[in-house]
């Protein structure tokens, strides 16, 4: 079993040791012959920053690469981005609903608790960038 998340991409820009890789994400049906006429097919362009001094020295803009991250890194990112906020929101709603009878206040409190959470995530972005690393391989 492969323990990596892999996406094909193209190097869009190189800034020092940072490679900005453009990834075309497509839905499964975007390769269908009638995808242009169907609203279900979807294609998005995403950019990934890969910090790798060795790769930055060897690769050039326009090179096709394979961007890799470990599966555990993906799970941790999903947990920080969706799991923890959901738990915070649910716990806040339950606690406020038990203390106060107004459901509107409980709902707004559940949403409001996300603001400091994402501010903390933003402040820790450099530390998280070192934890959530990507690798590139020439394709």
Image (spheres, helix red, strand yellow):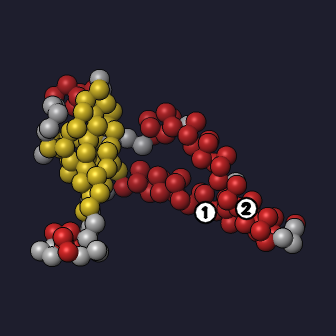
Residue at label 2? 108
Instruction: Give the residue displayed 62% in from the left and 41% down from the top.
Output: 120
Residue 54, by quadrant, is: top left
Q: Secondary structure at mark 2?
A: helix
Q: Is residue 65 left or right of residue 128?
A: left
Residue placed most toward the observer, 8 or 39: 39
Residue at label 1? 86
Residue 47, by quadrant, is: top left
Instruction: Tell me the distance, in whole angstroms, between the alpha carbons under discs 1 and 2.
Output: 14 Å
Instruction: Give the residue displayed 25% in from the left and 50% down from the top.
Output: 23
Res. 10 visible in picture = yes
Whichever of callouts 1 and 2 sits on the residue coming sooner in the sequence is: 1
Q: Position of residue 131 (x, y in %)?
A: 45, 40
Instruction: Give the residue displayed 55% in from the left and 40% down from the top.
Output: 122
Q: Position of residue 12 (x, y in %)?
A: 22, 38
Mark whose residue sits in front, 1 or 2: 2
Q: Residue furthest front?
A: 37
Check the image and report above or below for 96 versus 121.
below
Check the image and report above or below for 9 versus 82.
above
Q: Residues within 10 Å of mark 1 (few under 14, many from 20)?
A: some
Q: Secondary structure at mark 1?
A: helix
Q: Position of residue 36 (x, y in %)?
A: 18, 70
Q: Position of residue 110 (x, y in %)?
A: 70, 61
Q: Residues within 10 Å of mark 2 (few under 14, many from 20)?
A: some
Q: Is residue 45 left or right of residue 33?
A: right
Instruction: Give the residue displayed 26% in from the left and 61% down from the top.
Output: 43
Res. 6 visible in picture = no
């Amino acid at each position: 079993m492969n323990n990596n998340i892999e996406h094909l991409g193209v190097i869009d820009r190189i800034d020092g040791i940072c490679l900005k890789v453009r990834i075309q994400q497509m839905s499964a049906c975007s390769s269908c012959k009638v995808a242009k006429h169907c609203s279900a097919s979807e294609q998005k362009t995403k950019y990934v920053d890969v910090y790798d001094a060795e790769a930055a020295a060897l690769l050039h803009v326009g090179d096709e690469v394979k961007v890799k991250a470990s599966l555990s890194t993906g799970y941790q990112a999903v947990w920080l981005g969706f799991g923890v906020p959901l738990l915070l929101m649910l716990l806040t709603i339950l606690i406020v609903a038990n203390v106060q009878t107004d459901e509107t206040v409980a709902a707004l409190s559940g949403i409001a608790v996300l603001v400091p959470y994402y501010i903390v995530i933003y402040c820790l972005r450099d530390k998280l960038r070192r934890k959530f690393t990507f690798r590139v391989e020439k394709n």
